[in-house]
Amino acid sequence: MENNLLPFLPMLYVAWSDAILDGPELEALSQKMQDQTWLSPPDKQVLAHWMDPDRPPAPGQMQLWLKTIRESAAELDEAPRQSLAELGVQIASIGLTNGERCLSPESCVALEQVEEALGIVSAEAVQSLIADEVRPLRPLLEREAPSFNIDAMQAILDRDNPDVKNGTRTILTEQIFAQRDFESLHDHREATLAWSRHLADHGLGSLAYPESVGGKDDMGAYLAVMEMIAHHDMSLLIKFGVQFGLFGGSIALLGTDPHHQKYLRDTGTLALPGCFAMTELGHGSNVRDLETVAVYDKVTQEFVIHTPSEQARKEYIGNSAAHGQMATVFAQLDIEGERYGINAFLVPIRDKENTVLPGVRIQDNGHKLGLNGVDNGRLWFEHVRIPRENMLNRFADVTPDGEYVSDIAGESKRFFTMIGTLVGGRVGIGLSANSAAKNGLTIAIRYANRRRQFGPPGEMETLLIDYQTHQKRLMPLLANAYALDFGLKYLTERYVNRTEADSREVETLAAGLKSYSTWNATRTLQEGREACGGMGYMVRNRFAALKADSEIFTTFEGDNTVLMQLVAKGRLTDFKKQFEDSAAWGMVKFVAKQATRSILEHNPVSVRRTDPDHLRDSQWHLELFHHREEAMVVAVSQRLRSLIRQGMSSDKAVVEVQNDLVAMAHGWVEFVILQQFLKGVDEMEQSAEKEILAKLAQLFALSHIEKNAAWYLEHGDLSGAKSIAVRREAEALAKELSGQALYLVDAFGIRDETLAAPIGLRG
């Protein structure tokens, strides 16, 4: 190191060592250093590089600085002075003779002013720097060795499509994907489009399409790519999903071979940018009552697409404001005044030169809370004519002379069959939301393993991860992320291998897990941000983008509350099917079964048992979750029956019990998640990975029993003492897992280049 820079060394180390300064403060301190007239331009350039808030020094560089300071301090003939500036001058003056100083008195005064700008207690900082017992700075404090093999754990999480996931991780570390700020909405959108093209160039956009059009016919691989993209950038995730999943997926799943051959190859390479125009301003989640109309003209053999009112405009349509050239438009089919329900049509909206076509009006939605790399817009159609062949006709068609034909007789069944094929978007959003949660957990847990705060007088301050409150807020969320990984993998497998017979069940499962995962991600990112204090609020540490971009996940691909009502409806339908022979007698038998079970469960020994072996018993957890879900189904069914018998219409009765329906749906989803987590763990060979996954499953279960303690107390499943014991056992588990949390987030496999949060890098 140049001798002129040595006086700054103690200040540089202290400024970076424990993240005590934010970006603006570092920039102000850097400017103070640049104002030193005795420094040469090359020296100033080096200092500017060392003080760049976007490029913190590597751990090895910090170690070298600390070593230089300590070794130099040991050579001093006099005791180090009580300021960082004076210590720096002393270090720089080693080797000079006759008491010479490396700086003039005027320069020393200027250096003291730089230290004043640092704003710390200098005497304590000097003492800490030269004390042998002060730990060398590490990227993270790894006090415990991992109790499991991190690579083996990542392999468990990557068990579906590991090669695709690792390949996508590698692509996302290429320079084109480097995280950066955008000066304008246009720049952000163009960068997102370029990223999408780059992924398409690698063949990732067409993975789910038939091999005959350049694809791999592998929906599982496509969903794995979505899961990985979510670790990098949510705008890219949604742009990718709209283009290749919604637009391309609608052609692949609702169209037939002529559509595939004509459009899918260009869709998969992004030669044909498209959008998915379903949502309307006045209808939102109510797809069956969309107003956009497609009138068949049998004279010209064309469909006439029209927006009949302002409420019928297509709203928040991704890829439409700037880039889309074609839209899959969902509209009411009209043939000579007769309506035939919702069908899908391919409607060109721009030409190859990106000029908006006649009869089409497009308006930019502009800036949003997040996802500003996606060009959302509004669409209106003024009697736009398209060929008859542009109807996506897998489930229904219109003959040239205007006859509506379909192998599915009922309109309702036809509608749900069509919509059910598009449930993959919910699967992808559920997986992606859990990736966002994993990002937040990785940042927060790594920061908690390097950040110290408070402690006994005269001793080293306490790491955040060692505080019980920190363990309580982060460890159950870490358990959630692992549990959801198993639940979502189960959903993915069911979706990829679905049949017509189980499609409605898969749709219910997708609605529930999408809702649960996205709500969990929103909560996790908020807790993670708070757990990182002010550093979590800095844009460069990624929480701002993660929160803003993922929050809409709770709304699109179906509003979560609406989807949970769909889940509840599915559960009630399943419940009814159990007793089709005699609903009343079936209800009696079911309630009797519950009563018998309650007698067995509510004996004084069982309800009051509080030993750790029992409290950590996974079979007890699963039974308790299942009992709660079943009991809520019975209670809601009884309420609905009572209201209807009193003369209330079924629609009004459902509205009257909506809160109970949503609570029931939550109970079922939590049961499914725990069931699949335990099933996955049980099927593993005995290993260290299995042991810690079992603990995560126990924490997931106990934290949710604690969350729902009021219900269990009301229904006699827990005593007051046992409820307290559940809470304490959950805290004990959180403490046990906190020592391994660093390695559990490492197993998520998020590369530093992709995470790009300075406080959360592995280093």
Image (tube, rainbow, N blue to C red):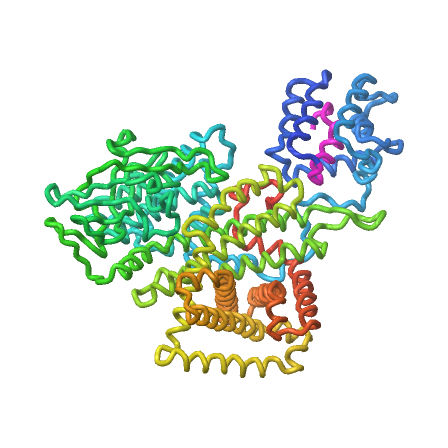
Q: Is residue 113 magenta?
A: no
Q: Position of residue 160 (x, y in %)?
A: 42, 59
Identify the magenta region.
Answer: 1-20
Answer above or below: position of 696 versus 393: below
Quadrant the C terminus occupies:
top right
> Which residue does the image show at 36% across and 33% down from the upper left?
363
138 displayed left or right of 480: right
Image spot of residue 609 (x, y percent): 67, 77
Q: Quadrant of residue 598?
A: bottom right
Q: Residue furthest right?
A: 78
From the viewer's perspective, tell me whether residue 541 is left or right of residue 459: left
State the residue lying farthest toward the front: 647
Q: Position of residue 423 (x, y in %)?
A: 36, 56
Identify which residue, 97 or 356, lies in the foreground. 356
| Residue 48: x %, y % from top left | 64, 26
Q: Is residue 87 above or below residue 625?
A: above
User: At 46% across and 81% down in the image, what residue appears?
Assistant: 588
Q: Is residue 600 above or below residue 261?
A: below
Please say whether residue 684 is visible from this viewpoint.
no
Q: Depth check: 502 or 498 in front?
A: 502
Q: Is residue 430 visible?
A: yes
Q: Main secondary structure of the magenta part?
A: helix
